[in-house]
Image (cartoon, coloured by chain):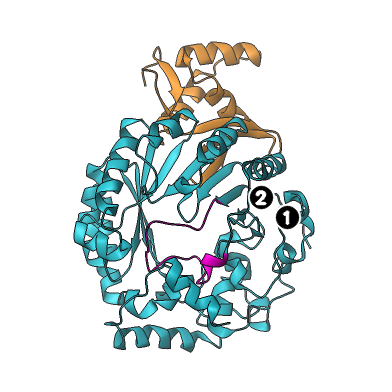
Chain colours: A cyan, B orange
Amino acid sequence: MSKISPPLWILLELTHKCPLECAYCYNQLDFAKTKDAMSKNDWFRVMQEAREMGAVQLGISGGEPLLNKDILEIVKKANELKYYTNLITSGVGANVSIVKKLKNAGLKTVQLGIQSHDKDTMNLITNNKSSYDTKIAFAKEVKKQGLQLIVNTCITRQNIHQVPEIIEFSKELGANYLEIANIQYYGWALENVDALLPTQIQLEQARKDTDEYRAKNEDMKVFFVVPDYFATRPKACMNGWGTTFITINPDGIALPCNTANTLPLDFPSVKEFSIEQIWMESHAFNYFRGDKWMKKECRTCDEKEKDFGGCRCQAYALTKDMHEADPVCDKSPFHNKLQNLVKKSLVNMDKKPLYRNKKNSMRFYEKV
Amino acid sequence: MQEEKLLQINAHFQLQWEEKQDCYVLLYPEGMVQLSLSAGEILNLCDGKNSTLDIRDLLEKKFSTQDLLAQIIDFLKEAMSRKWVVYYE
C-alpha cells in the first residue's frame, strides 16, 4: 500500500443534543444512546495530536455544539494551535451574546443552518417555533462582529421550491457564501426518504435558479451540492477513506466519516489511543484504504482512482454489504435498488417525516 | 493596482507556515491552498505594514536580485481578484 498521508481536517462533534428536530439529520437513528463522554481536556488533547500530525482545518459541530459549555475554551485552544476554525451551528442553543465571545476566542467562520426565508417553512422543518427568529438574530450578530458567515441550506422537498428566495434572503443577511446542500440520504434522512426526496424536475429547476444567480456574478458565492440519488457515478466520499478527514463523536469514537459508525466495524476511541495510532494503525481506518477490499466491479474499473468506489455507508445501507460498489454507480449490480427507492418516494410522497428527537430515537434502540 | 498602498491578508483567510507540508498555506472554509515559494514570501509580507513597493524592496534584498516588481504585481493582482489580499484600512 502507498504511504498514508496525514489527516488535514478534523471534525469535533461536541454533543448529539440539538434543540432542532430536522428530519434530514445525518446522525444515526439511535443517536440518543451516544453519551457526552469527552471532557474539555480530552478535546484539547485530540486537537493537539491531530495538529501535530498536520491537520489544519477544524470543524466544530454536533448536534448543536453551542450546547457544550466548554465551547469557548475549545475555540480558543484551537486558535492557539493555529487551526482554521469553523463553527457549524443551528444558531439555536445559546444566547446571541456568545457570538462576540466566539469572535474574541479566535473563531474564523460560522456556518449557520437556515432552511428557509419563510417562518412557517422553518417551523415545519425544524419543529421548533423559536428557530426562525433566533437564527436571524444570530446571523445578524455574526456579521456585526465581523465574522465570516456561510449560510447552509439543507434542501429537501419541503423547501426546494424556495431556492430563489433563499438565495435573495442569504444575500440580504450578508452571507459570504451560501451552500445549497441537497440532502444526502443517511441516518434520519434515509428513514424519511419518502417524505424528503425531491423529484428530478424540482432538482433541475433549483439548479437552473442557482445558475441564474451565478450568472449575475455577485459577491456571495453559491455552492450547489447535488443529491447523489440522481447521479450515475458515486461521489468520492471523504476524498477517500482515511485520506483527509477524521471525526470524533461525543463518545470519543474516532471515525473516517460522520456516519461511519453505521458500518459493522469496530472504531477506536480517542480515550484509548492517540490520533496517530488511530490514523496509522487501527484496523478500521486501514480497512477501506487502497483497492484490496473492492469487489471486481470496482477493482477493475478505470474510474476507481476518481471515486474510490463511492460511499461505504451508502453501499452498506442499501445493499447490506459494505464492500459493494456504491449503488449510485450505474455499473453496480444494485443500482436498480436505488432507482426503486426514488420511484417509491414518488408514490409515498405524502408520508409524514419522523422528527429527529430523543423520543423517536429511543424507538430505534429499544427494538433491539 | 495601487503600488504604494499598504496590503494585508483578508481577515477571513489564514496564512501560515506548515512544517509538515514544507510551505506556506492559505486556509479558508474547508479548504487550503499550498503556496509556491515566491507566492508564500509575497503573502507573508502582506501584513498591513508593507505596500507593493516595500515588498519588492524587501524581497529583492532578501534574495539579492532585481526586477521583481512585474512578477510581484502579477501575483498580487491574482491574489486580490481571489480576495486573498486586500488594501489595509
Q: Is residue A326 left or right of residue A191?
A: right
Residue A217 in sight: no
Could you tell me the amino acid type at mark 1? Trp
Q: Classify residue A76 by image quadrant.
A: top right
Instruction: Look at mark 2 in the image and give the residue it sits on.
Output: A7
Q: Residue at x 52, y 15 (%)?
A: B55
Q: What range of the chain is rendered magenta?
A: A13-33
Find residue A122 and report its horizontal and vertical position in percent.
26, 59
Sooner in the amino-acid sequence: mark 2 or mark 1:
2
| Residue A244 painted magenta | no
Q: Amino acid at mark 2?
A: Pro
Q: Say if residue A127 shows up in the picture.
A: yes
Q: Nearer the viewer, residue A112 or A357?
A: A357
Residue A166 image offset from top left, x and y in percent = 24, 55
Q: Nearer the viewer, residue A79 or A308?
A: A79
Q: Secondary structure at mark 2?
A: loop
Distance in Å between CA atoms under marks 2 and 1: 8 Å
Query: For mark 1, what is the residue?
Result: A279
Callout 2–callout 1 Cβ contact below 8 Å: yes
